[in-house]
C-alpha cells in the first residue's frame, strides 16, 4: 500500500460495509490514491469524512454520492 493510500485508509471509518462499491476500506483507499475512485463514496464517513479525504488528497470536497 502506498503512503497516500495508507493515510486515506486511516481516515476511513473501517466499517467494511462495501457501500462504496469496494470490498473493504483498504481497496477503496487504494482506488482513491490512484485516481480510480472519488472521495465521496463512503456513507458511514459522511460529509466530515469527505472533508478529511479532501484534505489528504488535495481534491475539492463534494456532496456524498447518492448511488
Image (tube, helix red, strand yellow):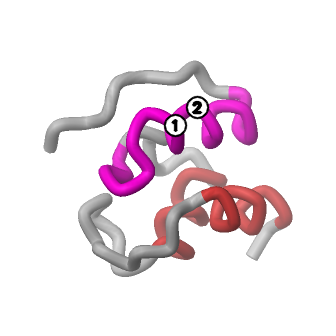
Location of mark 1 (residue)? 48
Percent position of residue 42, x then y: 37, 52
63 vs 44, nearest the viewer:
44
62 w.r.t. 32: above or below:
above
For residue 61, above or below residue 19: above
The local crowd at label 1, few if under 14, some if 14 to 19, many if 20 or more residues have their Cα within 10 Å, is few
In the rendered image, the quadrant that contains the N terminus is bottom right
- Say what secondary structure mark 1 lies in: helix
Report the residue marked by disc 2.
51
For residue 17, side relative to residue 12 (left or right): left
- Rendered-image quadrant of the C terminus: top left
Q: Residue at x 48, y 41 (%)?
A: 39
Q: Residue furthest right?
A: 3
Left or right side of 22 for 7: right
Q: Residue at x 85, y 64 (%)?
A: 3
Picture residue at 42% right of the left edge, 78% below the top = 24
Q: Give the x, y percent position of residue 63.
A: 34, 24
Residues drawn in magenta: 41-58
Q: Is residue 54 magenta?
A: yes
- Quadrant location of residue 18? bottom left
Where residue 20 appears, x then y in whole percent? Answer: 31, 59
At numbered mark 2, what does the secondary structure look like: helix, strand or loop?
helix
**Magenta stretch, main secondary structure class:** helix
Q: Is residue 55 magenta?
A: yes
Query: Residue, x 51% and y 65% (percent of image)?
Result: 13
Q: How many residues crowd mark 2 within 10 Å: few (<14), some (14–19), many (20+)?
A: some
Is residue 56 toward the left or the right of residue 64 in the image?
Answer: right
Q: Is residue 12 above or below residue 37?
A: below
Q: Residue 50 location, x and y as percent?
A: 51, 37
**How far, Cα to Cα, is label 2 from label 1?**
5 Å
Amino acid at each position: 500500500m502506498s503512503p497516500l493510500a495508507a493515510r486515506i485508509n486511516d481516515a476511513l471509518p473501517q466499517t467494511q460495509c462495501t457501500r462504496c462499491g469496494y470490498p473493504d476500506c483498504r481497496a477503496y483507499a487504494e482506488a482513491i490514491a490512484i485516481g480510480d475512485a472519488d472521495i465521496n463514496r463512503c456513507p458511514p464517513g459522511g460529509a466530515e469524512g469527505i472533508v478529511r479525504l479532501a484534505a489528504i488528497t488535495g481534491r475539492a470536497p463534494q456532496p456524498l454520492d447518492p448511488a
